[in-house]
Amino acid sequence: MARSITKSVTIEIVTLKEPCTACQIIEGLIRDMLKKLKAQYDVEVVNTILQHPKEAATVEGLEVEKFPALLINGEQITAGSLPRLDQLKRILEAEIYE
């Protein structure tokens, strides 16, 4: 049975303007992972850079203030950690396909 696309997917990466070294490394790994996923899925990647952690309240869907944070369609998936590629694929497929 063929899958049908039901909605678009937006992935938002929320980072700080001046992140620590560990955050920079995790962000780089997440971006590499997203490049691979963009080749397989039709997703939009949005970058949100906060000047200060206090601005986190302005990001819809951001609940845990650890960075970098990853949100898919406004739902926070990670906070300061590296998600597994297979985990992201499952989430994307659940969001994209019926």
Image (cartoon, grey):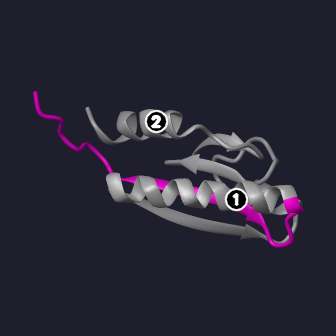
Q: With respect to residue 97, does 44 lie above or below?
A: below
Left or right of 28 in this view: 64:
right
Farthest left residue in view: 1
* Residue 16 forms part of the magenta stretch: yes
Nearer to me, 24 or 66: 24
Q: Position of residue 31 (x, y in %)?
A: 59, 60
Q: Viewer-proximal residue, 70 or 64?
A: 70
Looking at the image, can residue 41 be seen?
no
Image mark for residue 27: 1
Q: Is residue 98 visible?
A: yes
Question: Residue 59: which quarter of the image?
Answer: bottom right
Please give the name of the residue rendered at 38% of the width and 33% of the height, measured from the top-left corner: 94
- The image shows residue 79 at horizontal and vertical percentages of 74, 43
Q: Which one is in front, 77 or 24?
A: 24
Q: Nearer the viewer, mark 1 or mark 2?
A: 1
In this rendering, the answer to whether 6 lies above or below 87 is: below
Left or right: where 51 falls relative to 39:
right
Q: Position of residue 50 (x, y in %)?
A: 78, 68
Q: Amino acid at mark 2?
A: Ile
Q: SS of the residue at dot 1?
A: helix
Residue indicated by mark 2: 91
Residue 87 spot, x, y in % from top left: 52, 33
Dot 1 crowding, Cα within 10 Å, few <14, some 14–19, many 20+: many
User: What range is drawn magenta here?
Assistant: 1-21
Say which quadrant the C terminus sits in.
top left
Which residue appears farthest toward the top when viewing the image? 1
Image quarter in which the N terminus is found: top left
